Amino acid sequence: MTPFPTMGKGGQGKAVVLKNVSQCKRPGIGLIRRWACASLLVAGMFPVAALPAPGPTPQEADFLARHWPGDTIPPQGPPPKDYTSLESSLSAADCGVCHPRQYEDWKTTLHSRAMGPGVAGQTVDMREEDPATARMCWRCHAPLTEQQPLLQRPADGRWVENPAFDAGLQHQGLTCAACHVRAHRRFGPPARADSEPSAHAGFNVQTAFGKSAFCAHCHQFPPGDYALNGKLMENTYNEWLASDYARQGVQCQDCHMPDRRHLWRGIHDPAMVKKAVTITVSGAQNPLKVGDTLAATIRVLNSGTGHYFPTYVTPKVFVRAQLTDASGETVAGSLREAIIGRETTPDLSREIYDTRIAPGDSVDIVYAHPLPRPGLQLQIEVRVEPDHFYERFYRGLLESGTPKKGRAAIEQALVNAQQSSFVIFEQTLLLDIRSMP
Ligand code: HEC
Ligand code: HEC
Ligand code: HEC
Ligand code: HEC
Ligand code: HEC
């Protein structure tokens, strides 16, 4: 990719004024028009059911508190005597023998790669130097006791080898059993009409599987956890709770597990991100005159995301615009860039800016540049870097020499992060620029 000058760095590229259009709570800011605050598009997209309270029922909350206890899911223990060895296995591939559809989907997701090189490369050193922190990571990335090599002995707090550790299972990251199996008993959503519970002694029905609260254990920090500028580092469930989607009963599962499919597509998936936003360009009305200032507005509306776009500090979305001539050359100094995301210092100690877009909100990005000559066009591109933070973070780790056993894995994680970016929007506006008479 051409190394465009970026926001904040000297040279030609200057930051585009990135403005939040729908400041509903703070009307009347500068050039900003109020817009789109209440007109969320959900009603047209999902059937609107009778409106229940968005959170879990007390019974569901009770189940979830038991289902997702503390840092680690307790050991499954010995399987029931009447289970076959296939039914006794916790391995995703073995579940997949009878549940091929879920297995085929799950294999393609980041949940199945939650112990990929970035996490494994860090925790392999951490488990020796700081096992308590490693366990904290495993809480979301590999939460079964059977996935964790070390256990803390309650008697004296010492870390000891875990006799039930299964390295193959650890590699499966967020595996089926972490969400569905406790003490070898299966838990799942209400059965479909055609379901025949003929294996693993049936299953325990829990409506909580269909609720956003099911995902909160790992996609929401609890109150009082790590926050910057008064905002929790991970706040996806609360962002959703505050949105019209929650009021309409549209759960995480409706967007991320349509028809119960185990897809969990997010910021790493171009098709999913294209569904997240609506991008429109206005202004730049032809004909124009040499010497005029071209003014175009790029509006990015969060029309399809049930939380901030994007929700985490790790991705960044770059909106770039530039004038080019007939041969595609950039007019010097015309490149502008705006960044949508939440930027922190690499050590996460300070927030630098937060331009994420709340559900139903939009930002207007104003491009303004004088037109030096005829024969130019305006090129606009929106590029997503899902692993923007991690790229910098892994590079920093490698430069500091921190990874020891995990070095090769972190090198791989850096390569993966560098390769994950993609373009979701491209538009070229042909400009009819006339010379002065
Ligand atoms: C036990 C913890 C856990 C639970 C429960 C969980 N997730 Fe995740 N989820 C993760 C982790 C960890 C990742 C990141 C994996 C990685 O990339 O290493 C992730 C990644 C994702 C992604 C992909 C993000 C991206 O960057 O593209 C989506 C979407 C997602 N989860 C949605 C959900 C939904 C919806 C639910 C509830 C049905 C859910 N998750 C439940 C831990 C969890
Ligand atoms: C509360 C749940 C939670 C905890 C605890 C947690 N993570 Fe994650 N992690 C996530 C989610 C969700 C994502 C995906 C979203 C993102 O990219 O930020 C993720 C993504 C990552 C990624 C990038 C994706 C990948 O697989 O390369 C790395 C690396 C990572 N986590 C490492 C860690 C480490 C190291 C720890 C412990 C210090 C940790 N995580 C603790 C939930 C968690
Ligand atoms: C992150 C948690 C999570 C993981 C990992 C996970 N599931 Fe699920 N599963 C769910 C949720 C949540 C539902 C219910 C979705 C809904 O009701 O919309 C579900 C539903 C199901 C169902 C019922 C499907 C239907 O169509 O009625 C089966 C069977 C199932 N899962 C099996 C599996 C298997 C097998 C794996 C591993 C290959 C797996 N799950 C991995 C969370 C998970
Ligand atoms: C020998 C075959 C077999 C194996 C192995 C198996 N299952 Fe099942 N499972 C079934 C059958 C049959 C049902 C009944 C419902 C159906 O038709 O899917 C079922 C039901 C379920 C349900 C409830 C689905 C619902 O409608 O809510 C879940 C969840 C589930 N299994 C998860 C798993 C997980 C996770 C594993 C691996 C740890 C696993 N199963 C291994 C055959 C199997
Ligand atoms: C109305 C649909 C919708 C709902 C509801 C929804 N999401 Fe998303 N989600 C998306 C879209 C679209 C994306 C891709 C754009 C993005 O990353 O913001 C996404 C992205 C993500 C990501 C990727 C990380 C990131 O930085 O954006 C995670 C993780 C995630 N969602 C989890 C959840 C969880 C957990 C819930 C429920 C609390 C939820 N989502 C509710 C549509 C939805």
Image (tube, helix red, strand yellow):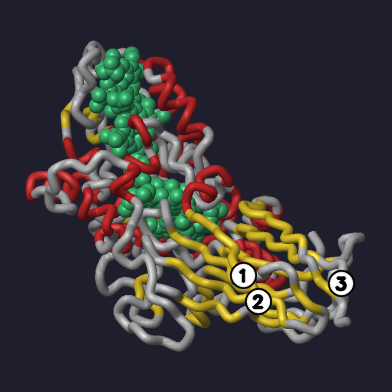
- Lower sequence index among marks 1 and 3: 1
In terms of secondary structure, where does tag 3 sit? loop
Question: Is 267 on the left or on the right of 186, as rendered?
Answer: right
Judged left or right of residue 77, residue 98 is right
Q: Using the image, tell me which numbered label, if any, was put on residue 374.
A: 3
Instruction: List the residue tagged with mark 1.
Output: 283
In primary-sequence order, the first of circles 2 and 1 is: 1
Residue type at mark 1 is: Gly
- Please state the horizontal and vertical placement of residue 432, each as a whole percent of the image: 79, 66
State the residue at coordinates (23%, 58%).
155
Which badge, 3 or 2, is on the more N-terminal residue? 2
Q: Looking at the image, is 16 positioned above or below residue 116?
A: below
| Image coordinates for residue 13, horizontal then vertical, percent | 74, 79
Disc 1 is placed on an element classified as: strand
Q: Which residue is mark 2?
A: 295
Q: Tag 3: residue type?
A: Pro
The answer to whether mark 3 and mark 2 are in CB contact below 8 A is: no
* Residue located 14% across and 48% down the image: 51
Is residue 143 visible in the rendered structure shown here? no
The answer for how far apart the CA atoms under marks 3 and 2 are is 16 Å
Could you tell me how far apart the alpha carbons at marks 1 and 3 are, in whole angstroms? 18 Å
Residue 47 appears in view: yes
Q: Residues within 10 Å of mark 1 (few under 14, many from 20)?
A: few
State the residue in front, 2 or 367.
367
* C-alpha separation, residue under disc 2 versus residue under disc 1: 6 Å
Viewer-closest of 332 and 126? 332
Using a 10 Å C-alpha cutoff, classify the residue at mark 3 as few (fewer than 14 neighbours), some (14 to 19) or many (20 or more): some
Could you tell me the amino acid type at mark 2?
Ala
Are circles 2 and 1 on residues that touch, CB within 8 Å?
A: yes
Q: Quarter-wise, where is residue 37 in the image?
A: bottom left
Q: Position of residue 240 (x, y in %)?
A: 30, 58
